[in-house]
Amino acid sequence: MTKRRRHTPDQIIRKIAEGNKLLAGGSELDEVCRHLQIAESTWHRWVAQYGGMKASDAKRLKELEWENARLKKLLAEAELDKAMLKELAEGNF
């Protein structure tokens, strides 16, 4: 079993571009995926997520997703603190 590999947004954009060139040249999708060393499901997910993006756009998207996750976590913690303080203020501890 091979180790799972993470690709950076730049690598994904480059592989999509290379794959599209191979597909335009008449290669089949399974051949292209084998050449890129990815699964067909990965190809379809990448095209859906990054298709038509430039590398800088993809990088910014990842940064925004990370920031959004961080903010959601902070909001959840604040809501929990608020609920705990409300319980204490009502005397239900």
Image (cartoon, rainbow, N blue to C red):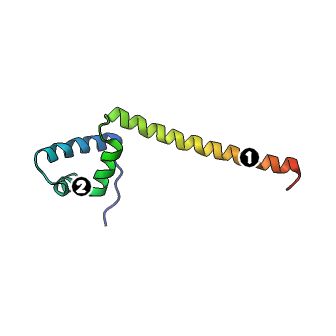
User: At 78% from the left edge and 50% from the top edge, which residue is drawn?
Assistant: 84
Q: Is 2 situated left or right of 88 in this image? A: left
**Whole-percent x, y for residue 37 in the image:** 24, 55
Q: Earlier in the sequence, mark 2 or mark 1?
A: 2
Q: Which residue is mark 1?
A: 81
* Above or below 92: residue 76: above
Q: Residues within 10 Å of mark 2 (few under 14, many from 20)?
A: few
| Whole-number angstrom distance, CA of label 2 to CA of label 1 | 47 Å
User: At 12% from the left edge and 51% from the top edge, which residue is drawn?
Assistant: 27
Q: Quadrant of the N terminus?
A: bottom left
Q: Is 91 situated left or right of 43 in this image? A: right
User: At 63% from the left edge and 42% from the top edge, which residue is drawn?
Assistant: 74
Q: Quadrant of the C terminus?
A: bottom right
Q: Considering the numbered disc 1 on the image, is that residue within a helix, a strand or a loop?
A: helix
Q: Considering the numbered disc 2 on the image, is that residue within a helix, a strand or a loop?
A: loop
Q: Which residue is mark 2?
A: 37
**28 or 2, nearer to the observer:** 28
**Whole-percent x, y for residue 54 in the image:** 31, 34
User: At 22% from the left edge and 41% from the top edge, which residue is drawn?
Assistant: 17
Q: Residues within 10 Å of mark 1 (few under 14, many from 20)?
A: few
Q: Residue furthest left?
A: 26
Q: Is 54 situated left or right of 36 in this image? A: right
- Residue type (three-letter) at the residue carrying disc 2: Gln
